[in-house]
């Protein structure tokens, strides 16, 4: 065999997030999000960058959909901007916002690309943050209202839904460490935000019931103690970053207090999923503290994340063993940032990203061969975009975006991944 062949019907796609690519933050009735506000805080985002224009995907989506089609991709995972649909986070829908997403979905379907819709990828309407944000229980119920609006508008043309993307990042980075919007540093508020995000997921599941395949996406990593003496620190870190979300969703259990977790909450949160979305980028090597480190000699990406393809296989096997009855899995994000440059010939060659993807897809194939039910892979990301607190300083895309004129240039990795998507097979390393 010269290639690792994936199962028939395996979904090959790519992924983006609304604030990272859309731009058009003041157009067609969109309200401000917490990221619009956070970007104006001096020093919060590298280079003082904002998502005001981003990749201008709001206007250029037909070009981007045509790009995906030319590469042979069969699915597109994108998020809907809550403040574009409900500018104040409550009340009636902004029809112009819904119309945009309807055009996008219709355009995808016309090209044979299946839309996978994420309802929340961190862009909370600022009006809701002004009323307390995710630490307030009411925000979860406002999310349910928003989910119902989107369901009613797109439910006839969308069959695949994700309630939340990486609720841990929204709670821990946004309300605990303060490195993401809204920039709060408070452990108690962090835990309140985490539970209310989970409650929002549960309420969203209920709202979307009967509207197709519904799941949630978590960012997960194998947690590895750097030395045997670091095992306790690793267990603490693993629960704080993963168990706090996996346990309520897959087991209906939470360590948070009864003053926060009310009767009936866990029943909603642990309702059966049609799929679990897994975002994997790296293992976490933990030492006492706990503190995440990178062992000497391990290759890293441009954001200093260790490159360990086998970690994806190990993560998936660990999930299967730890959670009997695990729902089917989609790899909803996997990719790498490298310092790509346009060559003299106008082409962008990114061999490190190709190697990263190659290794991770082979590791994914090993997990599937070992019996893990994985049904799709969504590469992060289609376009070089606004990379949150890193601004535009880091490039994750398989398509280079010129910041001055928005020119799109597919990189070597785009063509390589397109070949994988068209054939459903990954070349094996040369013997």
Image (cartoon, grey):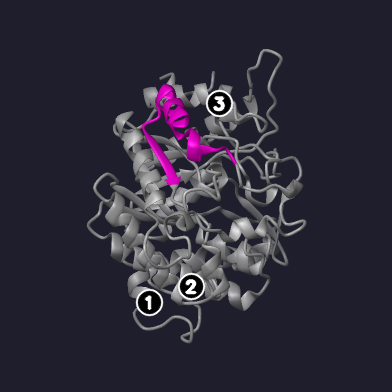
Q: Is residue 250 above or below residue 78?
A: below
Q: Are marks 3 and 1 in contact (CB under 8 Å)?
A: no
Residue at (63% x, 24% y) in the render: 351
Q: Quadrant of the C terminus?
A: top right
Q: In the rendering, at what x and y percent does residue 385 appear?
A: 60, 40
What residue appears at the point 77 percent right and 56 percent down from the top-left corner? 43
> Is most of the magenta stretch helix, strand or loop?
helix
Magenta span has 347?
A: no
The location of residue 114, given as percent across then percent down, is 33, 37
Q: State the residue position of label 3.
A: 413
Question: How many angstroms separate mark 1 from mark 2 (CA)?
Answer: 9 Å
Q: Which quadrant does the N terminus fall into? A: top left
The residue labelled by disc 1 is: 265
Residue range corresponding to the magenta coloring? 54-78
Q: Is residue 56 magenta?
A: yes
The image shows residue 159, relative to residue 150, as above or below, that is above
Badge 2 crowding class, 10 Å Cα cut-off, few under 14, some 14 to 19, many 20 or more, is many
388 lies left or right of 159: right
SS class, disc 1 = helix
Contact (Cβ within 8 Å) of mark 1 with mark 2? yes
Q: Nearer the viewer, residue 417 or 390?
A: 390
Question: Is label 3 in a helix, a strand or a loop?
Answer: helix
Mark on residue 195? 2
Residue name at image x 60 percent, y 36 percent: 384
Q: Residues within 10 Å of mark 1 (few under 14, many from 20)?
A: some
Q: Which mark is residue 282?
A: none
Q: Is residue 172 left or right of residue 362?
A: right
Q: Position of residue 415 (x, y in %)?
A: 51, 21
């Amino acid at each position: 065999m010269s290639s690792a062949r994936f199962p028939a019907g395996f979904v090959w796609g790519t992924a983006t997030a609304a604030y990272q690519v859309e731009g058009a933050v003041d157009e067609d009735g969109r309200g401000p999000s917490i990221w619009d506000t956070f970007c104006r805080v001096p020093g919060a985002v590298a280079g003082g960058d904002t998502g005001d224009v981003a990749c201008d995907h709001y206007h250029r989506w037909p070009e981007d959909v045509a790009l995906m089609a030319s590469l042979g991709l069969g699915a597109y995972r994108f998020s809907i901007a809550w403040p574009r649909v409900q500018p104040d986070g409550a009340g009636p829908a902004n029809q112009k916002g819904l119309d945009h997403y309807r055009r996008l979905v219709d355009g995808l379907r016309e090209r044979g690309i299946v839309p996978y819709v994420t309802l929340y990828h961190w862009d909370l309407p600022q009006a809701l943050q002004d009323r307390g944000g995710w630490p307030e229980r009411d925000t979860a119920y406002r999310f349910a209202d928003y989910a119902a609006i989107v369901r009613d508008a797109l439910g006839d043309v969308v069959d695949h839904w994700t309630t939340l993307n990486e609720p841990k990042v929204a709670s821990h980075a946004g309300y605990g460490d303060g490195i993401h919007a809204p920039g709060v540093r408070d452990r108690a508020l962090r835990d309140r935000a985490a539970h209310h995000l989970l409650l929002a997921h549960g309420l969203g599941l209920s709202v979307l019931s009967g509207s197709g395949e519904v799941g949630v996406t978590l960012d997960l990593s194998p947690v590895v103690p750097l030395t045997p003496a670091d095992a306790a620190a690793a267990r603490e870190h693993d629960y704080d970053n993963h168990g706090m979300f996996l346990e309520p969703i897959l087991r209906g259990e939470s360590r948070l207090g009864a003053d926060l977790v009310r009767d009936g909450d866990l029943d909603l949160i642990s309702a059966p999923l049609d799929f679990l979305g897994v975002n994997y980028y790296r293992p976490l090597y933990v030492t006492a503290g706990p503190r995440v480190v990178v062992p000497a000699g391990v290759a890293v990406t441009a954001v200093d994340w260790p490159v360990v393809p086998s970690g994806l296989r190990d993560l998936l096997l660990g999930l299967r063993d730890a959670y009997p009855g695990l729902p089917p899995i989609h790899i909803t994000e996997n990719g790498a940032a490298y310092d790509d440059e346009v060559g003299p010939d106008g082409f962008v060659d990114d061999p490190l990203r190709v190697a990263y993807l190659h290794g991770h897809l082979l590791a994914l194939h090993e997990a599937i061969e070992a019996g893990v039910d994985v049904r799709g892979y969504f590469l992060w990301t289609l376009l070089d975009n606004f990379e949150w607190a890193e601004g535009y300083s880091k490039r994750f895309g398989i398509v280079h975006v010129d910041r001055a004129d928005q020119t799109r240039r597919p990189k070597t990795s785009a063509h390589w991944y397109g070949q994988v998507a068209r054939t459903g097979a990954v070349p094996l390393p040369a013997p």
